Image (cartoon, grey):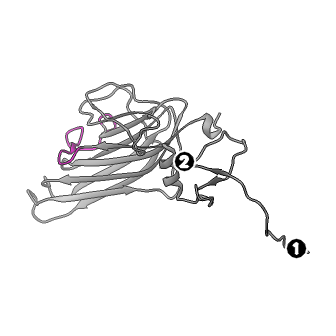
Amino acid sequence: MELSQIAMKNFPMSGRSAIVPIRQAEGMQNDLWLSKEGAAVEMPWKQALVLEGRCFQVQVGALITGIASGSATVPELAEPECIISVPTGTVIMPYRINCTCNADTLATDNSLESIIIGWDRGKVYDGTGTHTTEVAYNLRGDNPRSTNCTCTSAHTDDITSIPVILTELCRKDVHIDVTSAVALGQITIDLLYEPQAAPFIVGPAMLVIMWGGTSPLTGFAQVEWAEFSKSELGIV
């Protein structure tokens, strides 16, 4: 096979100088994104999505006040600690979820404490049950767009649209085995979900976070995702 080189000297390159990118529909032509100085813009994909105004964060728990396990102590689908409900026509890509939970005292020997992040692939949250409505803040400070998702936390009685977790995205289980059974002391459980290949959750769907175990847990979470319409991704 014969190979030849093409000299690029004096080959003009044009594009569009701008602070933020312009997203085109699937299959449409787009211009090269240039800085104001004329250099091709290259940045990590997450930072580009933040700059475009497509990324949101929900905070579960605030400052020193955490969210307690919903149903007595154990994680329960009917009383999750957080729901991001994705409506029909919307797609989210969760790229970072950080959970930190504390158990003040362990009730018994052989305690099992868990944090679970899952995905109901077939329905949205119907708004039932006692809960706290959370605000999803755009990670670009001028708030160029709002989320289409419904975000809730601290579910303390059963919801009607109980999630069915067909896809468990991440979990952490801590098994405590001690000789002294009662009032052992404090433990902290951390779970950081930063997938190499982030899922695209297509609505109707729910992203669900739960924690709890043999002893009650009080926790905090920061949930971050990028958001699109189905049409923007070329999804029929």
- Element under label 2? loop
Give the label on residue 29, or none. none
Q: Which residue is mark 2?
A: 20
The residue positioned 40% from the left and 29% from the top of the image is: 125
The residue positioned 24% from the left and 52% from the top of the image is: 101
Disc with the residue nearer the chain's start (1 vs 2): 1
Q: Is residue 109 magenta?
A: no
The quarter of the rendered structure image containing the C terminus is top right
Segment tinted magenta in the rendering: 62-79
How far is disc 1 from disc 2 in space, using C-alphas?
Answer: 37 Å
Relative side of 17 to 13, left or right: left
Q: Which residue is mark 1?
A: 4
Task: Note whether 73 is above or below 163 in the view shown.
Answer: below
Q: Nearer the viewer, residue 28 or 225?
A: 28
Task: Identify which amino acid the numbered label 2 is placed on.
Answer: Val
- Element under label 1? loop
Q: Quadrant of residue 182?
A: bottom left
Task: Identify which amino acid the numbered label 1 is placed on.
Answer: Ser
Task: Note whether 32 is above or below 84 in the view shown.
Answer: below
Give x and y (percent) for residue 40.
Answer: 63, 59
Relative side of 116 to 43, left or right: left
The residue positioned 33% from the left and 39% from the top of the image is: 82
> How dense is the environment of label 1, judged by Cα within 10 Å: few (below 14), some, or many (20 and up)?
few
Task: Note whether 128 is above or below 200 in the view shown.
Answer: above
The quarter of the rendered structure image containing the N terminus is bottom right
Q: Quadrant of residue 4?
A: bottom right
Give x and y (percent) for residue 15.
Answer: 68, 52
Mostly what secondary structure, the magenta segment?
loop
